[in-house]
Amino acid sequence: MGDVRDLRIAIIGAGMGGLGTALAFAKKGFKHIDVYETASNLGFVGAGIQMPPNVVRVLDRLGCWDEIYAEATNVQGTSIRRGSTDTELSHVQMPDIAAKYGYPHCTGHRWSLANGLFNGCQKEAAIRFHFSTALVKINSWAAPVSLTLQPRHGEPFTIEADLVLAADGVKSVTRTQMLAELGTASEEEDTGQAAYRIMLTREQMAHDPEMLALLDSDTVVRWVGERRHIIAYAVSNHQIYNLSTAQPDTNFAAATNATYTTRGSKSAMLQVYGDFCPLVHRMLDLVPDGEVCEWKLRVHKPLPTWVLGSVALLGDACHPTLPHLSQGAAMAIEDGAVLAEVVSRVPDLSSPESLTKTLKVYEALRKPHCTALVDLAAHSGRILHLGEGAAKEARDREFRENGRSGSVPDKWASPDVQKMIYGLDCMREAAEKFGGLYKRVDV
Ligand SMILES: Cc1cc2nc3c(=O)[nH]c(=O)nc-3n(C[C@H](O)[C@H](O)[C@H](O)COP(=O)(O)OP(=O)(O)OC[C@H]3O[C@@H](n4cnc5c(N)ncnc54)[C@H](O)[C@@H]3O)c2cc1C
């Protein structure tokens, strides 16, 4: 039997999942890791991101956390407020997250997270990046996998790999082809929601003491209203205030599936949040005309499998999620770390079936967990977006009583949910459960 670290690994996509996967395999000693990415560089990363302790644990083990943490905000609490009045419905203190889970809960700039992972990858001789190179087709699924790639300038070419890890995002070509191969339709699920993503600089906010107080604080604020909310926090050493919204999708409803972002209209954005409090309004009004960007929030129906032959899906390619639990990128990076753990333990390299079974162990470890989190994010959105009525009154009562119950309706901020998600050491779990699961999974 050869050395598992000699496997030729092709990773599709250099988003958070692809970068994390490449680094995790390199740290395990794999020697041949090729990353293929459609974009000419790391792509659009102009927004904030929450980095919960479950992913900080992984980033720390991959050796890239210190650099990311240097610019991050260590979150000390969350304030959930009525959007229309700015009245606080609940305040969840989080000063003990690091003590409880070993790592802090942080917010940061997406660029900082992507760059930290990328810098980590660049220190690894085993990893080679191929930007401006898109996967167009998987020609065969069993090892050696044959795949055709299309460089932006030049002729398509075909390569072979022993293992293909597809981190090609919510629009995953690999997922569509895998489902077609299995005779199943690829079914997107319309969330009916869209998001504005906004970054305000200290300079823009400097004239307004209320805004400056938000920028200087370590608290994540969520303003909720009927069918809408805004979540906001400081990033980049408190120099940038990041706002991410969720509202009914009106602009994309008639668009084709291929449309995910659009230049939004500032007046439409101000109107959507027209009945929110003056503080929110003043912040939205700072966005320059012509710079409003709206994102369609898309998810996919649960997949029958994430694995076919020697190909595995990860991240948004197999479990795209609404952002209300702030776990999408975290789950993608965790997937990569778990894949590296299990593949490094493949029992019989001479048997393609053994590699498939190993990938099925990854699926068994991750699919139930990620599916539960995707469902929880959707559930949280429904609760946050309630309109007037008995259900909303019950929700607000639960918010007020959170101190006693240890549970709040905003699942992101709920201590019981945090325990379930933040407490998971996905790498240790993979190492501990591999042997038992390998005996049980079917191919
Ligand atoms: C508004 C909003 C807020 C969010 N907030 C958070 C948060 O606070 N915390 C959090 O953890 N998550 C958050 N998320 C979710 C998170 O952004 C995603 O879940 C995460 O980026 C998924 O990573 P990925 O690597 O799977 O996919 P992506 O980041 O989408 O990367 C896919 C990559 O594959 C490339 N690609 C696609 N097709 C091909 C191809 N055929 N060939 C080669 N390359 C290809 C793409 O160019 C891209 O670079 C949020 C999402 C949204 C929309």
Image (cartoon, helix red, strand yellow):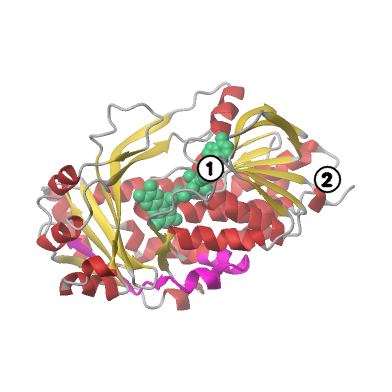
Residue appearing at x 64%, y 59% in the figure:
121
| Region in magenta | 56-81
In the rendered structure, the answer to whether residue 139 lies left or right of residue 246 reads right
Question: The residue under label 2 is which amino acid type?
Answer: Asp
Some atom of ligand 1 lies within 8 Å of the CB belonging to the residue at label 1: yes
Q: Residue lying farthest right?
A: 1
Give the image location of residue 180, x and y in percent: 57, 23
**Residue behind mark 2:** 348
Give the image location of residue 216, x and y in percent: 28, 75
Instruction: Inspect the magenta stretch and tell me whether residue 77 lies in it.
Output: yes
Residue appearing at x 62%, y 63% in the figure:
120
Which numbered disc covers residue 207?
Answer: none
Distance from disc 2 to disc 1, alpha carbons, whole Å, reads 36 Å
Some atom of ligand 1 lies within 8 Å of the CB belonging to the residue at label 2: no
**Residue behind mark 1:** 39
Give the image location of residue 418, x and y in percent: 41, 63
Judge by depth and name the residue closer to the eye, 419 or 95: 95
- Does dot 2 land on a helix, a strand or a loop? loop
| Quarter assignment of residue 74 | bottom left
Q: Are marks 2 and 1 in contact (CB under 8 Å)?
A: no
Question: The residue under label 1 is which amino acid type?
Answer: Ala
Give the image location of residue 36, x and y in percent: 63, 42
- Does dot 1 land on a helix, a strand or a loop? loop
In the rendered structure, the answer to whether residue 208 lies left or right of residue 180 reads left
| Residue 401 seen in the current view | no
The 10 Å Cα crowd at callout 2, few under 14, some 14 to 19, many 20 or more, is some
| Residue 8 seen in the current view | yes
